[in-house]
Amino acid sequence: MPDRQPFIGPVIGGRGTESRDRAELAALDGAPLATIGLAPQLLAQAALNRVRASADGSVPPPELFATAGKLFATAELEGETPQEYRRRVVMATGTPAGAITRAIDGIGNSLGMVERLNRAELPAPFEVPGYSTHWVPRGSLLAAVVPNNHPEPNVTWVRSLSMGMSVLVRPGSKDPFTPRRLLAALLAAGLDPDKAAFLPGGHDMGEHLLAQTDLGLVYGGPAAAARYAGRGDVLVRGPGRSKALVGSGAAQDDGLLDDLVRWIADDGGVRCNNISLVLTSGPAEPLAEALAERLAALPVLPVLDERATLPATSRGNAEAMAEYLAELTAEAVDHSSARYGGSPVADPGDGTAVLRPVVVSVNRPDASPAGTELGFPFVVVAPWNQDDGTGPLRESLVVSLPDEHASLAPRVLREPSVRKVVTGRVKPWAGLPETPHDGSLAQFLLEPKGLVTAEAES
Amino acid sequence: MTELTNVPAQGGEPPKPTEYLRDILRWHFDPATGSPFWLARARTLDFDPLTDITDISDLRRFPDVSDDLRTVPVEDLVPAGLKGRSFEVFESGGTVGAPKRVVDSTARVRNIDWVSTVLAEHGFPERGHWLHVGPTGPHAVGRSVRRLAQLRDGMCFTLDFDPRWVKRLIGSGRTDLAAEYREYLLDQMELIVSTQNITVLFITPPVLEAVCARSGLYERLARSLKGILWAGTSISLETLHQIEETFFPDATVAAIYGNTMMGVAPQRPREEGDAHPCVFRPYVPQSIVELLDPQTGEPVAYGERGQVLVHQMSRDLFLPNLLERDTAIRVRPATGDDVDGLADIAPLRSADAPKVVEGVY
């Protein structure tokens, strides 16, 4: 039995604020999910003034983050149990329940090792008598515009707190739950209430925060990425456009096909490191056909079912997406829709709509819609040959080289727009805290400064 | 020449709308007093304005002449009965194509004089300098605010403020330039505020928000301002609350709603039990506002949202049946008044279609 509909308003100075500006957040089945108190620009400005006034660069103790991570994953916070939190996120965003369950654990783990994560991103400290190098924040105030697709990107702003920043968080319109719960956990663990503010609101307010703070962090689509690409004070996490380059035998390699299906569709395909373009040195169409066949076997389940792998959306959005897809893939060969009776939109029977995987093939690696990333398992298969080189692999959060092209790894790593390379049968999101997922947060927030003391002259 | 009778004398009873209507129609459709614009159009009407229009609701039989106002030579708008008076021409925003032009001799001035008495009821300062952070040039609001300052014993500072340029920048996606223009306005404000004692500020909400983000300018104004008059765009409840309680707690804050066609409807003083913090009261009978259901064309009930229909009626200008792109909520008249209020002005919108978002975020 769901509890009373929650009110989620701005949190400023550690306290919930009764904003007079309200919006109703509906679940994907149309049921009311939460009343959101919105922060218009002036309320955000008031919060910003307050947070700036006490932004002193102090670093909370690492135990605080570990405690907060445990509370986030296990405690009732603001009257919300972890189970209720998960239900709300799933029903608001459509990200499958299993993915949210894993994200809750992932966030708890990350908060338990913020020191290790931060240390991994910085060179070993230099210090000899009289001379030392200090990594210090490039400012004191960070604006974080966080996404809806998955809870884990929220770890980034929490880590920023651990490096001495004060943070203003603007949540995505569908998932205010995760950052609010994280902030509640941090406050319960003892975070100084003026270190962070939580400000649900519109895009304009987010832009205002990014203009007013010293540094910014933005998760967004192609438009946001283009908009902030030239801003040295804003770290943009744009489309992932993750790719795999496979050999000519891939269409006959059952093991590889099963792996590719997971890399494309795990967590509902909503991760920025889910594969959305498969390049092959063999023929594209048989590989696309084999992938489409396997992906079509993924069951259509209510998204709250822990076994669900496909994401849900509202029926209205699903229809709009189907129309958009038809236009987007008009020039490509569609290997999936015929398997579903024409439309990838399916009814899981819970009032939502599920988008079934769509595989299309094209005859050149740069032909539209190659490079398009959508919030469900959508993949383009295209031919690649040696002469194409690493060009078609550019603009990728992850490039996977699972078989015969693994030797390209050093060259692909040197591509500035490729953020990570995996070889062999390894998930695109595999990694240790020490291996970068997308550059270095610490080296964005901090810069090295020299301190030379009287000892140097003695 | 006798003084025009279409105005309530100071403190006197305003004329009944129907009597007033009869007088206005006689004036504009009599060849001796009417304008070439209306006398020519009278021949194309399928009714007789003098006998068939007896009630305000009949005004909807007139065609909406807004588009003609984009091209008509302005002298054609001047009533023959007012030949020799000085007239001014004002233009609409000009967001979509050519601007609409209206003429005015004294009617809008009287509207503003009445607005000043309403501001007094709000407790606006009786003296002190004003700073007008809004359009001047072809836009009527510049003259209106200047007059408010003069009526209240102050001088009015103005800026170079070109809303059409800003709209062009935004319309063509050059939002960075639009933001730079806004900063340029603040620079102009700062040059005035740094040496002059400004008591009352006229401003639009987006520029006021930008002022609050520039700490030096904001702090100076927060100390000196006793009144803020805002207009131009709608404002959220929380934004208004923040202006009144957090950022300018020492200033009296009030708004005006209006445009080139309808004149100025000031916010009336708040009353116990008001459901809306800002209720606007038109200058009836010169400016009559009806709120209509866009589907049926019938007036909406109290508490409901309708599309704004304006009838602007003075001896200077007759503009009946102008359907605006705004909507408002119809509010019962305030105690002791018989004119409906307008609240929560918002642009007319069609239902939002679901939008496809590319990318996973």
Image: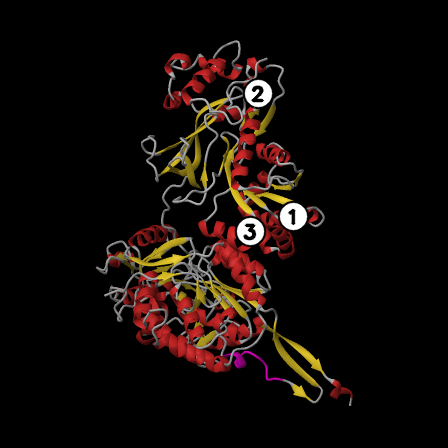
Picture quarter with the C terminus of chain A:
bottom right
Question: At label 1, which amino acid type do we have?
Answer: Tyr
Q: Are marks 3 and 2 in contact (CB under 8 Å)?
A: no
Residue B184 disc label: 1
Q: Position of residue B4 (x, y in %)?
A: 54, 18
Q: Which colour scheme is used?
A: secondary structure
Question: At label 2, which amino acid type do we have?
Answer: Pro
From the viewer's side, name the closer residue of B182 and A133: B182
Looking at the rendered structure, the secondary structure element under dot 3 is: helix
Q: Which residue corresponds to mark 2?
A: B73
Is residue A120 covered in magenta? yes
From the image, state whether disc 1 or disc 2 is nearer to you. 1
**Pointer 3 and pointer 1 on the same chain:** yes
From the image, state whether disc 3 or disc 1 is nearer to you. 3
Residue B209 disc label: 3
Looking at the rendered structure, the secondary structure element under dot 2 is: loop
Horizontal arrangement in the rendering, residue A21 relative to residue B242 (left or right): left
**Which of the two labelled residues, at mark 3 and mark 2, occupies the earlier sequence position?**
2
Work out whether B307 lies above or below A318.
above
From the viewer's side, name the closer residue of B60 and A341: B60
**Which of the two labelled residues, at mark 3 and mark 1, occupies the earlier sequence position?**
1
**Which of the two labelled residues, at mark 1 and mark 2, occupies the earlier sequence position?**
2
Is residue A73 covered in magenta? no
Judge the density around disc 3: few (<14), some (14-19), many (≥20) Cα neighbours within 10 Å.
some
The disc numbered 3 marks a residue on which chain? Answer: B
The magenta span reads A117-125
**Pointer 3 and pointer 2 on the same chain:** yes
Horizontal arrangement in the rendering, residue B178 relative to residue B347 (left or right): right
Give the spatial CA distance, label 3 vs label 2: 39 Å
Q: Where is residue B327 in the image (x, y as percent from the top left)?
A: 41, 38
Q: Do the residues labelled 3 and 1 touch (CB within 8 Å)?
A: no
The disc numbered 2 marks a residue on which chain? Answer: B
